[in-house]
Amino acid sequence: MAAPCSSGVAPERAAPSSGMYKLEIELRRGHNLAVRDRGGSSDPYVKFKLAGKEVFRSKTIHKNLNPVWDEKVTLIMDSLSEPLYIKVFDYDFGLQDDFMGSAYLYLESLEQQRYCTHCRSLHENSMLRLCVPQQREVKAYRWKPYVNKVSLDLAQQQSVRLSELHRKSQLWRGIVSIALIEGRNLIPMDPNGLSDPYVKFRLGPQKYRSKTLSPQWREQFDLHLYEETGGVLELTVWDRDTGRRDDFIGRCQLDLSTLTKEQTHHLELPLEESRGYVVLLVTLTASAHVSIADLSITPLDDLQERREILRRYGLWKSFSNFRDVGIVQVKVMRAEGLMAADVTGKSDPFCVLELNNDRLQTHTVYKNLSPEWNKVFTFNVKDIHSVLEVTVFDEDRDRSADFLGKVVIPLLRIRNGEQKGYVLKNKELTGPTKGVIYLEIDVIYNTVKAALRTVVPAEQKYIEEEPKVSKQVWTYLLVNLKRTQRLSRSLTPCVTFLSRQLFVVVVWNFELYMLPLALLLLLLWNFFFSSSRETAEMVRKRDSEPKGFMDKLYAIQDVFISVQSALDEVASYGERIKNTVNWTVPFLSWLAITALCLATLLLYLIPLRYLVLAWGVNKFTKKLRDPYMIDNNELLDFLSRVPSDVQVMQHRELKVDPGQSPNKRRRTNLS
């Protein structure tokens, strides 16, 4: 009953799936595998990978080109969009294992709740046979049926179709504000009796993953509520495992239609088929739509509607709805001189506009290097320090869209009503690429709301790629080292001055009794916190079990990424402090001046002990007044809005060369 081996054509992909799935795989045998040893045989074993992580490795069959494994593995997954990658190796003791072949299994092409034997063709006419009991149901899990199409394919993974890639272009009607507080009584998944839990959220096409691994997550984010996708929020809890596929802990669902709007709900959701709870604060708020229209329908060009919008964001409305800071209207006129992405020397360009997590796109103009879109896009502004991203793609019906160029425009740099040509940049925003796009942008916002939103955490992207060690990692590391060295040289005079002042202050105020007092406080500290130190030592000994070579390699990789991230963060914050002083963003520099003047006035009028007392009372009663408050550092939130030197370079506009305009060249040729 083995299906015939494919000819290398990838199957047509179904829409990305949603829900939880249990996939059972039985690896049976191999046939006529490649010879990799000198004796005319091989020692084959098989690796299975999902989303770049190894999920199973078979045993090694020595000296056999027709091995029989008869091994089973069960995988829990929340999506079928990623193919199962199968790789066969020849084991070599003390040497690097030899690659024998690979194949893909597209999970979306499988028919559910039905055993099916699949034959996978490898290199050199080798065969691999496995039995897949298609996504057998687990109690309380939701399933989506899929029709069995082409069951076999070889080496290439088909890209997501354009309509799936840009599914977020639909309009949303409200905001779901979620505060992820904590997890309670979760199942330990690691050998040491602990876990590294994180939570995944899914609402329609949107996904969000918590950033921290502690059960006390304390994270806040917003998701958009669409008309078409319904209102079922899906939560899954996972245990992070470095170098291996993360372990599934549990899942739960929340029907948002049952919640009252404009009210914060404190929810403790039990995990289905598992132990533990997830604590959330959920608020449903209605919001103005983002919109797409033709040039004939522009809100800010209508005088009456413009006056109403100006009144809405006037100073008298400064203390109502702090999340509604302003509105931005973008007219996408046309582009000229785009890159030819098709073999015909033409392109099928369309334009995608992104503002934080809002994403809209134009229609496609086919077979044209100088398209005219003439569309108007309207976004709500929740943070005036956001950056508008405009990207031009080439549509390919059978493949993912090709990148043609991109520009990023900080909202604070926009001059209202000015139609301007922007030179397109490459993906890294470090240099120009072919083409100019013409935009006209208007921004209306409330200054007081914008200033208050500056000292709260910035909105994060729904999905952010995890840092990985890439081929260019050494380049990035050297760049961050140079940035850190340059920063240290620039701060040396300031540090020297402050150290001299500190020396004078310490010498002037030092008394001899302070020396034994410091030693006494150190002894008391060690006495009171010795139990917690012993607990940490026990955990350290429990974690210090012998590790294999791959575990050590993954640990080195994590350390390398952590060092690189730390260097980047140190250099970025130093550059942001410098750019605040250098008036790189005048709005933020004026805000800093206002805050310093207010602090000076308070310190002059009010004794310091009263200010310290008020600060202490506020800090120590914060948890009593609001147990679920998410802590933040106002100074770091302010600095996060100041661009680093790398961001300044990325945001810099390139000058348009009039000689490169196709219209100018056409006029010159006619004359």
Image (cartoon, helix red, strand yellow):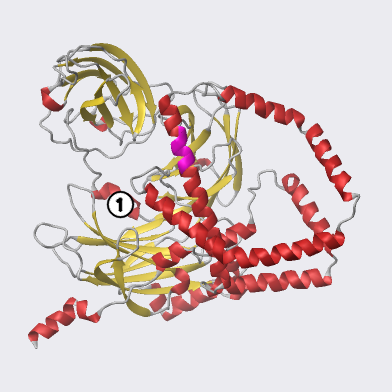
Q: Is residue 401 above or below residue 209?
A: below
Q: Which residues are magenta?
A: 555-560
Residue for point 18% across, 34% down: 155
Residue 219: x, y in percent? 56, 45
Query: To which residue does mark 1 refer?
Result: 166
The amino acid type, in three-letter code, at marker 1 is His
Q: Crowding at label 1, few (<14), some or many (≥20) Cα neighbours within 10 Å?
A: some
Residue 95: x, y in percent? 30, 24
Q: Is residue 610 visible?
A: no
Find the residue positioned furthest to the right: 513
Residue for point 39% across, 65% down: 650
Residue for point 32% across, 76% down: 655
Q: Is residue 594 visible?
A: yes
Q: Secondary structure under badge 1?
A: loop
Residue 203: x, y in percent? 43, 43
Determine if the magenta segment contains residue 559: yes
In the depicted view, which residue is nearer to us: 593 or 309? 593
Determine the image quadrant of residue 35: top left
